[in-house]
Amino acid sequence: MEKLLENQRIVVAGGSSGIGLALVKMLSEDGGALTAIGRDQQKLQELCVQLPSMKGVALDARDRLAMECLFMEEGSIDHLVLALSGAKGGGAFSGLALSELREGFDAKFWPQLNAVQAALPFMRPGGSITFITAISATAKLPGTAGLAAINGALESMVPILAKELQPLRVNAVSPGVIDTAWWDFLPAEARQQVFSDMSARVGVGRVGRPEEMATLIRTIIITEYINGVVIGCHGGIS
């Protein structure tokens, strides 16, 4: 099989779980030189055992100095994927603690921007940056105003950054409900109820799989004519 990303350097921030993990496993088959960033040292070590050619780096993307040091060590980078996230910010707005919404921004919005700014001096012209946002930015679902604020803020920057940073490509993928550890903040029974309810609201009749999102991100990375867009992958949510 042709290795489409051979000799290209790819950094996946948030690559030790969920969509980021699925992407790392998928891109390893394309021959890319992969670095996965995450906060869980044990998960990264286990992943490196599975994928010996991959480099795992344990750090918190909110630490700007640590991010800058990492990219200095990496050198030239072809592709950056931002799978950093947190579980705070959901719930009906009338009862939403703004301190929790602030934590939601601190876990996703600021770390993603932190990673981009730290990486920019080392990004190859013509390479790509891919944000991972969420369909809450546009789905208009009750109880997601805070999540919409976080993800909508990121999505609003994408077409502007694509112009500012050209010929570097900037895109985002906007997942629907995906079966990942992001939902672990809910008890098992409540999680299954959410999945059941959302399955009834999407055209394909089920929640998504992280491998499906990884396939879309891979397509964006290897297709050089995709630029400045947010692509939804939500099963036809209504």
Image: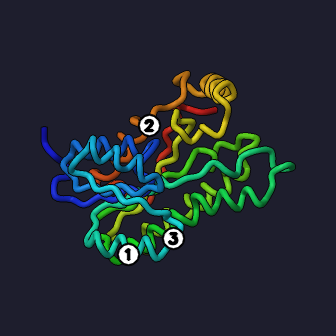
Numbered mark located on residue 210 in the image: 2
Name which residue type carries label 3.
Asp
> In this view of the protein, which residue sits in the foreground, 32 or 227?
32
* Image vertical order of residue 182 relative to residue 150, above or below: above
Q: Is residue 110 visible?
A: yes
- Pinpoint residue 3: horizontal percent, then vertical percent: 16, 46
* 3 or 1: tag closer to the N-terminus: 3
* Image vertical order of residue 83 relative to residue 183, above or below: below
Estimate how packed mark 2 is, as few (under 14), some (14 to 19) or many (20 or more) residues with alpha carbons within 10 Å: some
Name which residue type carries label 2.
Pro
* 2 or 1: tag closer to the N-terminus: 1
Name which residue type carries label 1.
Cys
What's the CA distance linking mark 3 and mark 1? 10 Å
> In this view of the protein, which residue sits in the foreground, 81 or 153?
81
Judged from this view, the residue extending furthest toward the right is 94
SS label for mark 3: loop
What residue would you read off at disc 1? 69
Report the residue at 51% width, 67% height from top: 113
What residue would you read off at disc 3? 63
Depth check, mark 3 against mark 2: the one in front is: 3
* 3 or 2: tag closer to the N-terminus: 3
SS label for mark 2: helix
What's the CA distance linking mark 3 and mark 2? 27 Å
Report the residue at 28% width, 69% height from top: 74
- Pinpoint residue 168: horizontal percent, then vertical percent: 34, 68
- Pinpoint residue 57: horizontal percent, then vertical percent: 37, 60
Answer with the quarter of the image where residue 169 lies.
bottom left
Numbered mark located on residue 108 in the image: none
Estimate how packed mark 3 is, as few (under 14), some (14 to 19) or many (20 or more) residues with alpha carbons within 10 Å: few
SS label for mark 1: helix
What's the CA distance linking mark 2 and mark 1? 30 Å
Report the residue at 32% width, 76% height from top: 72
